[in-house]
């Protein structure tokens, strides 16, 4: 039987619910939702908010500033995913792309392994990979470090800004004005950590949690299950993406993560410092730790700007609610990371122009 | 960065593999897949396969991607 979106939408509308706010915690969900036009067809009482799930967006300005300084170090080739290049630091217009124009060597890579390869080809340069992302990206980043170690590629190092989802969700929930009724959990983070990784949401906070895939059908199904849980007053954990997500997750990837990284305090845009929310290289890999290899420090308190990405990330403000949105801040000339990243809530809202 | 199109494994050499989908070939690593086999469909994230997908569902996902490509 083919999937009938109309029937699911009707079933959603028929549920006895008042105003409901659901949050997706994955940048790819944000973009899929915008692209599919789902927001405009959902029942009026259902509002979708974007959470802290876009890797580039949650990276705070001071960390970007440090990376911009690192780019200017002699002999350094900085490598990262394309999204990172246009993210502005605390000074307007300053980004890796601008630093590149000023003479810094910055390369886009598709995989952290490509950065190790680049280091092999340029033994006279220091190749630094900027690791951003969550549990989905971290195991591959760890594997790249191990590969560099095994192959003796000593001029490769990792600048880790990797983060984990659970501590950020706990910090978000602890905020005074937290007003989310249920979470659409990130499918590919769950592929790694297992659906069980989100059980704390219903069990400790009484919040519905549904792991969802990325096709429109997957998202619609997951949203329906969240609403149904709310209507029935029975918050629980459900896995609506079983083709890619098991209960326990990918053990090989988890093992890799454990082997190379340990939890440490980290800074998030909009959420501030969160204990245990970052992934730093373990001591035995310190030779590959760019944060130890280079003495780069940026100001700990960047000057405030009018950018309100921090509030957008926490679901407190819709992209259109920011006074810069679509005026001073556009994908062509972004002020904040949410407008830069292909997974950012502002970029998604701007590209598909909907409420 | 999170975009994960299913790829079919067409070459495997240790942890290095080549995947193919929608007429495109990509090198990838299969460190996190237990006993990867030729013809397996995998979800790939930043150059690493993160999970195997059942063939039927992988093909359905690919069909959606094909439709998306027409409009992008």
Image (cartoon, grey):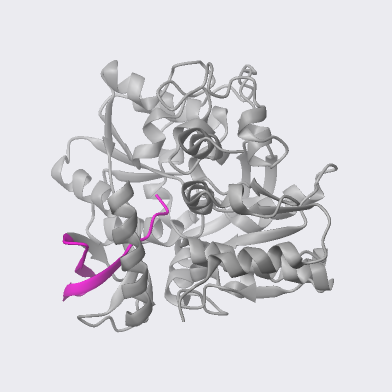
Tag count: 0
Q: In this view, does A21 lie above or below A219?
A: above
Q: In this view, does A184 lie above or below A245?
A: above
Left or right for A135, reference A42: left
Q: Is residue A248 magenta?
A: no
What residue is rendered at 67% in x and 70% in y?
A225
Q: Does the magenta stretch include residue B2?
A: yes
Nearer to me, A264 or B62: B62
Residue B15 visible, this orientation = no
User: Where is residue A310 drawn, in percent x and y?
Assistant: 65, 33
Left or right for A80, reference A340: left
Q: Which image quadrant is residue A231 in?
A: bottom right
User: Where is residue A2 drawn, in percent x and y?
Assistant: 45, 76
Magenta range = B1-24
Q: Give the position of the C terminus of chain A as an image quadrant.
A: top right
What residue is rendered at 65% in x and 75% in y?
A238
Q: Is residue A240 above or below residue A49?
A: below
Q: Main secondary structure of the magenta part?
A: strand
What residue is rendered at 32% in x and 48% in y?
B71
Residue A271 visible, this orientation = yes
What residue is rendered at 61% in x and 46% in y?
A52
User: Where is residue A191 drawn, in percent x and y?
Assistant: 49, 70
Q: In this view, does A24 lie above or below B58?
A: above
Nearer to me, A4 or A134: A4
Nearer to me, A239 or A1: A1
User: Where is residue A305 drawn, in percent x and y?
Assistant: 62, 18
């Amino acid at each position: 039987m083919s999937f009938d979106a109309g029937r699911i939408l009707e079933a959603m509308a028929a549920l006895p619910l008042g105003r409901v706010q659901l949050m997706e915690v994955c940048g790819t969900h944000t973009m899929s939702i915008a692209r599919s036009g789902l927001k405009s067809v959902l029942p009026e009482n259902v509002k979708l908010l974007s959470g802290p799930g876009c890797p580039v967006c949650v990276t705070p300005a001071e960390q970007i500033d440090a990376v911009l300084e690192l780019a200017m170090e002699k002999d350094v080739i900085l490598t990262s995913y394309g999204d990172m290049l246009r993210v502005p630091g605390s000074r307007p217009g300053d980004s890796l792309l601008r630093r590149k124009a000023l003479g810094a060597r910055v390369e886009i890579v598709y995989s952290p392994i490509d950065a190790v390869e680049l280091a092999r080809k340029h033994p006279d340069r220091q190749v630094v990979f900027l690791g951003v992302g969550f549990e989905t990206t971290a195991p591959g980043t760890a594997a790249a470090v191990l590969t560099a170690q095994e192959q003796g590629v000593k001029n490769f190092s990792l600048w880790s800004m990797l983060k984990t989802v659970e501590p950020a969700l706990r910090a978000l929930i602890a905020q005074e004005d937290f007003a989310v009724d249920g979470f659409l959990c990130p499918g590919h983070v769950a592929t790694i950590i297992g659906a069980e990784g989100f059980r704390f949401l219903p069990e400790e906070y009484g919040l519905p949690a549904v792991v969802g895939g990325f096709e429109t059908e997957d998202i619609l199904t997951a949203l329906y299950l969240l609403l149904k849980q709310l209507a029935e007053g029975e918050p629980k954990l459900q896995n609506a993406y079983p083709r890619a997500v098991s209960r326990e997750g990918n053990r090989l990837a988890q093992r890799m993560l454990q082997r190379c990284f340990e939890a440490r305090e980290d800074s998030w845009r909009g959420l501030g410092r969160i204990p245990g929310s970052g992934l730093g290289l373990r001591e035995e890999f310190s030779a590959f730790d760019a944060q130890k290899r280079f003495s780069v420090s940026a100001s700990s308190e960047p000057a405030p700007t009018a950018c309100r990405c921090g509030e957008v990330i926490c679901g407190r403000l819709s992209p259109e609610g920011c006074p810069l949105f679509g005026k001073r801040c556009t994908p062509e000339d972004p002020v904040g990371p949410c407008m830069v990243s292909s997974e950012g809530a502002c970029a998604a809202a701007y590209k598909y122009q909907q409420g | 960065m999170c975009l994960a199109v299913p790829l079919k494994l067409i070459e495997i050499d240790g942890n290095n593999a080549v995947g193919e989908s929608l007429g495109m070939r990509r090198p990838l690593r299969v460190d996190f897949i237990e006993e990867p086999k030729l013809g397996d469909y995998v979800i790939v994230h930043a150059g690493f396969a993160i999970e195997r997908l059942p063939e039927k569902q992988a093909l359905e996902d690919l069909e959606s991607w094909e439709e998306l490509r027409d409009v992008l």
